Amino acid sequence: MSTRELVVLGTASQVPTRQRNHNGYVLLWDGEGILFDPGEGSQRQMAHTSVAAHDLTRICVTHFHGDHCLGLPGVIQHLSLDRVPHTVTAHYPASGRTSFARMRHATPFHETADLREAPVHRAGVLAGGPGDPDGSAPPFTLEAVALSHRIETFGYRLTEPDGRRMLPALLAERGIAGPDVGRLQREGELGGVRLADVSEPRPGQRFAFVMDTRLCDGVYELAEGSDLLVIESTFLHAEAELAENYGHLTAYQAGRVAAECGVRHLVLTHFSQRYDDASAFGTEARAAGYEGELTVAEDLTRIPVPKRR
């Protein structure tokens, strides 16, 4: 059975605390492993999970503030140390190319891994979809969307193509079984029976990752219709002015976005070190009107992508 889940490596913003490691998140999706924003200590946090260097196929960095990228040197060197045999693609804002290069070669090491850099120059599709610009043709579309922070920042969205769910009772009624089911799915028609006659639409799943940003159109674009939304909520709403000034969201704003965008499972994270107890973040998101599934992330939490609608 395929695995689709988020592994939380860390939940702290700016500086780690005794309870929270720097940011870091791994999305496991049908054999792909996408590492988002590896902050300091991400390599060690992976050792406390079942996620290994061999599981990583992509790295996505939203921006180059330290709490979102200082784990890159260790992770990159780990890929070579473990002799990961497949290509790992790194997406990051093109304006941070120099920063990425410095971290990639922060110290001397024997580089054997095939790490392919794919800087993000503008919002749009990065991989998957027609004419896949990435060239890897994954079973999803990966997009970047511009956010509003103090430096260039992109959020990421992964979208599975819509498909169809076969209906066994209707297949049996039409006498279609075994290999013929596969033929019908591939060809769209078999012996006068159309695919639409024995199946129903199956919406593709959607995952979104929103870090360091004030409220902007990009936040709503990423969140719209997400099955699982990981979103920063650095401050509680009493500090809304501070959040705006520093380019961040509050838990109330995150909850409001999730409610308006039909998010099924909301994951709050990236908490300021000023808060010892993160439970109030969930309370604020509920106060904003969000009624779906809600997780106030903790380090090493594993969060399944919700089952299909």
Image: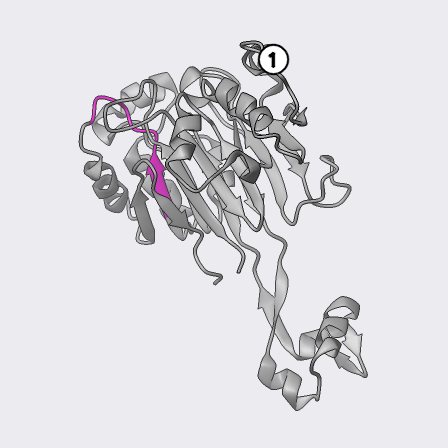
Magenta stretch in the rendered image? 266-275
Residue 79 placement, left or right of 6: right
Secondary structure type for disc 1? helix
Quick check: 303 above or below 2?
above
Report the residue marked by disc 1.
101
Quick one: label 1, few (<14), some, or many (20+) residues within 10 Å? few
Q: Is residue 275 visible?
A: yes
Query: Going by the image, does 274 lie left or right of 256?
Result: left
Q: Does residue 285 appear left or right of residue 217 in this picture? A: left
Q: Position of residue 181 (x, y in %)?
A: 71, 76
Side of 290 where 238 appears, left or right: left
Position in image of residue 99 (x %, y %): 55, 12
Residue at 68% x, 79% y is 197
Q: Quadrant of residue 11?
A: top left
Total number of numbered labels? 1
Vertical side of 243 occupied by 184: above or below: below
Q: In the image, what residue occupies the spot 55% across and 30% down?
A: 60
Front position in the image: 297 or 94: 297
Residue 309 in picture, x, y percent from top left: 47, 63
In the image, 290 versus 2, the foreground residue is 2
User: Is 124 placed above or below 169 here?
Assistant: above
Specify how the rendered protein is coloured: one colour
